[in-house]
Structures are given as C-alpha cells and as structure tokens.
Image: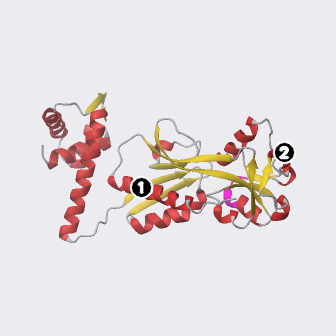
Amino acid sequence: MNLTHLKCFAVVAQEQSITRAAEKLYISQPAVSKMIHQLETELAVALFDRQGRTIVLNRAGELFYSYVTEVLDSLNRGIQAVTGGVDTTVYPLEITLEVASSLIPQIVTTIQTKFPNVRLNLKQHSVMATNLQHADFIITSRLLPDFVSIPLMKEEIFVGGQAASLTNKRFIQMKDLPTKQLIGLTPQSPLRQTIDRYFAAIDQPLNFMYEADDPATVRGLLEAGVGVGFIPAVTWQKVGRQLHIARLTPEPLERTLYLSTPKRSQTNIQREIGNELIRLFLNYQTTALKI
C-alpha cells in the first residue's frame, strides 16, 4: 500500500465510477481497477459494492475512507506548511437553514474568519421540499430520516409583544392569548408547525391576524408594535429584548434544534465547520431570553 493507492481509492470513492476516476487521475481504467484490487487484497476486505457500472463504498469502505481523507488532508497541510505555500483550494459548502435564519450573519462571519477558502452556499425559506441530501449541514427542528442528527439545544418559545399588548404579564395562559393581534409565520414554516402542534394537542387552534413567510418580516412587525407573536428564546433573542415576553402556562412551549448531516463520510474541513457551528449555538444558548 502506498500513497498512490490511497489517492486512487479516495477518487474512486468520490466519483463512484472507475471510468470517471480514471479520467480525473489521467490514468487508464485497468490501472485504477488494479490499484483498488491490490488495496482490497492487502486489507483482506472488500471496500466497494459493485452495482452495474457504479461502485459504492460499503461499510468497511466508508470507515476506511474517513481515515484516508484525514491522512491526505493532513499530508497536504504538512506540505504547505513546509514549503510555505498558501492553501488556495476553494472548498464548496452548503448549509440549509430550516430554522435559526437570524444567526446567518454570525455563521457567515465565523466561517469567513476561520475558513477563508470556503465558498458558502446558504439556503433558507421554502427549503423543506428540496433535496436535502445535497446539503453538507442542515439546521432544523425535526429529526430527518436517513440523516445523522446532533441536538444543538432546546429552546423555550415565549409569547412576545409591546407591554400594552400583554398587560405586563410574566405568565400567560393559552386561553388569554390576544388572538385578534396574533402575528406569525405561514403554516409551512417549521416554527409555525411546532406552535400549531402544541396548540392542537390541547384542542385550541390559533387564528393569526397577520402571517408572513419571512421570519425577519414577523420580527419587524413585532418591533413595530403591530401585535403579539411567538419568540424563540435563543434564536430570536435580539428582537425579544425589545419586547415584553411572557411564558405560556401551565406547560411551556419548547423546541429542539438539530445539526443534521447526510450519512456519508465527512472531510476534515467539514468536521471542523460542524464543530464551529455547535460551538456557536452553545454560545448563543448562554444568552437566551429568560423570564
């Protein structure tokens, strides 16, 4: 086993095709097949499942691939450190935000500062119908099937508005909500779905007077004193500090946010960015709104 074998294996794993891997490596298809066969023989384990013209990593292959990419990334960084070269490789990264869009500036700033070579593609609004498998990370409030989901935090959702709207209450019962003044997101939004499930469970549907599909619009209406809405304690804390907030009783309204990733091997830079996203949310949790 040598470095050429490992590089060849990594490209085949990424391309899922001997033909495309050969084109990318500028060598013949038989040479690629031979190196993969030699690698599997030396390891005494099959690394790929053959499916017609496509080959995909099996369980052993996925495990081995995670180590190989780490080795190759470390080697490249070592070469650049020794030669004094600057890493000019551009790393594309896609983050889909079903929730927490208010933290986008902080997410972008963090990635820009710590990972300047990352070309970031952010997706939000009406994303629930898209193919999430294309994303590297999904920030969501639901458990996605066939994804690895790490809980980022649990946040309470308060009722918030100008003080006059809530008569300065610190606690409010569901039956006392001023329904004629309710402002909220459209029923398709994850936050609205969390709220609707909560009230459906107690057989008390809500009637919103004003609805918008953009969280920033809802926050702006609340700041302007148009009515009363629901304020997540962490992700909407900036607007919440300008409003009077009250806790729903007898049971508080809460949701859990997750960092979800497709079930495939991650590169080192993806792992590092994932850790930074977790750290960012943990930091924001320490400044959550409180009653």
- Residue sitting at 66 percent across and 48 percent down? 191
- Looking at the rendered structure, the number of numbered marks drawn on it comes to 2
Category of crowding for the residue at label 1, using alpha-carbon neighbours closer than 10 angstroms: few (below 14), some (14–19), many (at least 20): few
Counting residues from the N terminus, which is met first, the one under dot 2 or under dot 1?
A: 2
**In the current view of this chain or complex, which residue is farthest to the bottom?**
84
Q: Is residue 35 above or below residue 117?
A: above
Of tags 2 and 1, the one toward the viewer is 2
Q: Is residue 48 above or below residue 120?
A: above
Which range of residues does the magenta coloring cover? 212-217
> Taking the image as drawn, is residue 20 in sight?
no
Three-letter amino acid code of the residue under disc 2:
Lys
Given contact means CB atoms under 8 Å apart, are the residues at marks 2 and 1 in contact? Answer: no
**In the displayed structure image, the side of residue 125 where residue 36 appears, left or right:** left
Residue 234 pos. (x, y %): 61, 58
**In the displayed structure image, the side of residue 138 where residue 80 appears, left or right:** left
**In the current view of this chain or complex, which residue is farthest to the right?**
180
Q: Which residue is mark 1?
A: 275
Badge 2 element: helix
